[in-house]
Amino acid sequence: MNTRGLITIHFKTTLRDSLFGIVLVGLLVWAFSSKSVPKEFTGQENFTFYTLFTMMLVGYAVMVAISFTSMIKRKTARFYHLLLVMPGRLSKHVFFELLPSLLLGEIASIAVGLVMYMNTENASPTWLFLPVIGSSLFVFGLSMVSMVVVLQVSNVRLINIIMFILLFVLARVPKYLLEHGYSISVATNVMILIALGVAVLGPLVISSINTERVLLAS
């Protein structure tokens, strides 16, 4: 089977296995993008921060949803053991396996950013540049880290529950920063650094997967 056929199969099965999670993410996307950016976050600097944060949060939610549904289901069925015996580099097979979740995360986060931009008066298209770049890097790395955690951690359900609860805590961060007078520009720079760090970490953890830990974590 060629690479395109393999990716197509992975994408279809991920959509099927993650249907419930994708519906939840769809509701989350609608909740974030059905209204304009809060008045407190108008202006280029505040808009950039709020949109970047929201896009990264939606990408994070997609990874949690897919990990909690499709990935855990395959792990329970020991589907990922097949990757260990396939010819070629393990990291390449793992990347193809996570590609559907990466694409879904990118699509969801960018869609939210576009809707938020269209719902904001007097916003310039250039305001979206940093949010799109930052969220794309974040989702890119997070998809790999999420996959490796599923492969190498035994009690991955507990981790996903904690990450799901953390989602609601993180959603309160923008207004908390604003209410307590923290610098929005500094917060934006920190988020970009986090996105870059996660983007670098992703390929590193993929390339260093321990096959013994994958077997023991099943």
Image (cartoon, rainbow, N blue to C red):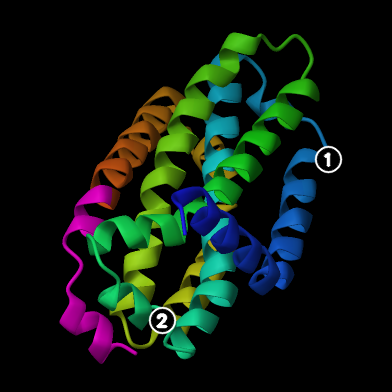
> Dividing the picture into quarters, in which one does residue 95 lie?
bottom left
Give the numbered dot on residue 156.
Answer: 2
Front residue of 133/90: it is 90
Disc 2 and disc 1: Cα gap in Å?
32 Å
Q: Is residue 105 above or below residue 87?
A: above
Give the numbered dot on residue 122.
Answer: none
| Residue 151 appears in view | yes
Front residue of 22/39: it is 22
Tell me the crowding category of disc 1: few under 14, some 14 to 19, or many 20 or more residues within 10 angstroms, Cα based.
Answer: few
Q: Is tag 2's residue or tag 1's residue first in the polypeptide sequence?
A: 1
Taken as a whole, is the magenta stretch helix, strand or loop? Answer: helix
Kind of residue at badge 2 = Val
Rendering coords of residue 12 (x, y %): 65, 62
Q: Is residue 106 left or right of residue 182?
A: right
Magenta range is: 203-218
Magenta span contains residue 134: no
Q: Is residue 174 left or right of residue 111?
A: left
* SS class, disc 2: helix
Q: Is residue 95 left or right of residue 21?
A: left
Rendering coords of residue 136 (x, y %): 47, 36
Rendering coords of residue 39 (x, y %): 73, 26
Residue at label 1? 34
Tell me the crowding category of disc 2: few under 14, some 14 to 19, or many 20 or more residues within 10 angstroms, Cα based.
Answer: many
Q: Residue at x 52, y 28 (%)?
A: 131
Q: Is residue 124 left or right of residue 209?
A: right
Kind of residue at badge 1 = Ser
